[in-house]
Amino acid sequence: MSEQATALKVIVFSLLDEEYAIPVSQVRSIEKVQHITRVPRTEPYVKGVINLRGVVTPIIDLRTRFGMPETDYSDSTRIIIVATEDVEVGVVVDTANDVMDISMDTIEPPPEIVGSVEIEYLEGVAKLDKRLLILLNLDKVLNPDRVSKIEG
């Protein structure tokens, strides 16, 4: 079996000193934080929208989405533009650290309890040397039915 067939290429980012990963195939770009325009009557984790190269893109704060304490954005805060189904959304993360290949045989099903992140949001956990990467299921995290309400 080829190496490519047994590895998953991911973007690694952090929230509150925990490392998370999402497949590169779902990432469109990584941007510095820019002005976010609030949209009234949206979920608390929806921070608003940005104009990204002429496209109005909804922005979700993953800390708020996962029930973590909010923090001020810093120079290392990033917006990762991700796509799921037909929806493009920006997710705010503390830092975007790395692009790496994860061997599929290091990925285990999510444990029953992982911090404050609901288990339904998790795809699995990858054990790499002394690091644990939490793989997110973006379809469940973003819940496109709710997110798309603010687009149009």
Image (spheres, rainbow, N blue to C red):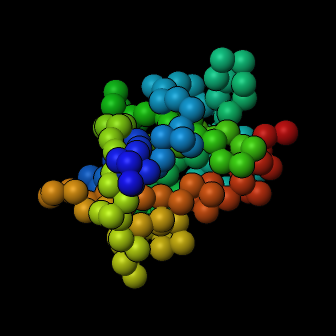
With respect to residue 44, does 9 lie above or below? Answer: above
Q: Looking at the image, can residue 94 be seen?
A: no
* Left or right for 78, reference 83: left
- Taking the spot 36% from the left edge, 71% from the top edge, the residue there is 108
Q: Which of 1 and 82 is in front in this view?
A: 1
- Taking the spot 35% from the left edge, 37% from the top edge, the residue there is 99
Total numbered labels placed on residues in the image: 0
Residue at the top extreme of this rendering: 53
* Left or right for 31, reference 60: left
Q: Nearer the viewer, residue 55 or 70?
A: 55
Q: Looking at the image, can residue 137 be seen?
A: yes
- Taking the spot 66% from the left edge, 17% from the top edge, the residue there is 53
Residue at the right extreme of this rendering: 152
> What is the x, y in percent for residue 35?
57, 25
With respect to residue 97, does 110 lie above or below? Answer: below
Q: Which of 72 and 49 is in front in this view?
A: 49
* Left or right for 3, reference 88: left
Residue at the front extreme of this rendering: 1
> What is the x, y in percent for residue 66?
48, 61
With respect to residue 56, does 132 lie above or below? Answer: below
* Left or right for 128, reference 34: left
Q: Nearer the viewer, residue 105 or 146?
A: 105
- Taking the spot 63% from the left edge, 57% from the top edge, the residue there is 139
Residue at the left extreme of this rendering: 130
> What is the x, y in percent for residue 83?
63, 42
Q: In which quarter of the image is the C terminus?
A: top right
> What is the x, y in percent for residue 1?
38, 54
